[in-house]
Image: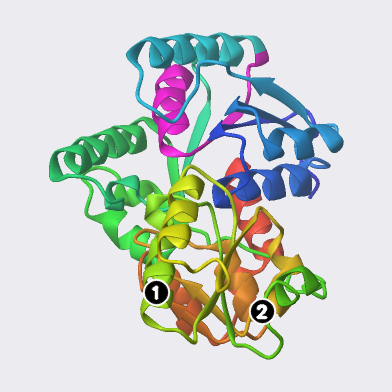
Amino acid sequence: MKIPADKKILFVITKSNWGGAQRYVFDLATALRDDFDVRVAFGQEGLLAKKLSETHIQTFPIGALQRDVSISNDVKSFFELLRLFRIEKPDVVHLNSSKAAGIGALAARFAGVPQIIFTAHGWPFWEQRNSVSRGLIYIFSWLTALLSHTIIVVSDYDLKVAQKMPLVGHKTVRIYNGIDFNFPLGSADVVRHSFPKGVHITGTIGELNKNKNQIALIEQAKNDSNMYVAIVGDGENRLYLKKKIEEYNLSARVKLFGFMPASEVLRGFDVFALPSFKEGLPYVLLEAKAAGLPIVATRVGGVGEILDAKNMEEFSLEHMVQKTAALYR
């Protein structure tokens, strides 16, 4: 049965750069726009904002909403979101990323939003931080979950964690991230032509940050003169990784390619590597498996569930959209 188009869904996410959480919001917003009145609020400008604008989905920049901790900005973003929720009067606020979720859940409660959904894209307290920071982030995540009516986790691994949280497990559901398995693969000449002909290329794709641990591949290449590495992505660690490549004299064997869609580079890899410290349910791993690449990855978050899966139907975009839409009803 078709849902009335006047039922309003407002997605909220901290950053508008392109990563797994941003792709999740974009895929749901574009897939559900015919059945719901879909809108998206975000903090920093980025590719997500650009892509949403191209599809004519209404967006709301929240200038003070940033990933870094700032009491003044966090208070400002709370009041910006509170004002937005009171003006827009959404039926559902769907929160993504820990900062937007925590502040957004509180603001949504004050605004009287009927349904608050929080998707945890991998619990943030597994990130590489000191024990005090991880403890505080755990409390923040738990409070966010308490304030939400429904929590979506993207792996069975994270579901087990949620079920151990007081007063949270009963309202948590697992819905895998999903992709269209019929995505076209490009020639990836930009990768192949950057290395000597015939060499074996290990490739990785992801935001360049500490949790993705791309430095591990650079360190491995330092110790293996036959290893060639293609690192695709952009982020805060780009300069650090570039300096390490230069310091180790690896410029001929380790290349930084910047942001490129996975479909344009996967054919350039002989092996896909994902050395992350923390993951939710990585889209790029789904794409690498769909492309038939050998995979080497750390078993964190939902990684093992992808690697061990025999039937990939639950990882389809259609399945993700249908299961999520059912929650909005």
The secondary structure type at the circle numbered 1 is helix
The residue lying toward the viewer, choosing from 57 and 276, is 276
Residue topped by disc 2: 290
Name the residue type under label 2.
Ala
Magenta highlight range:
88-109
- Residue depicted at x 43% and y 70%: 217
- Residue depicted at x 34% and y 46%: 124
For this view, does 163 lie left or right of residue 74?
A: left
Position in image of residue 294 (x %, y %): 55, 87
As displayed, is residue 73 above or below residue 290?
above
The outermost residue toward the bottom is 198
Residue topped by disc 1: 222
The residue lying toward the viewer, choosing from 27 and 223, is 223
Name the residue type under label 1.
Lys
Residue 129 in view here = yes
As displayed, is residue 81 above or below residue 114?
above
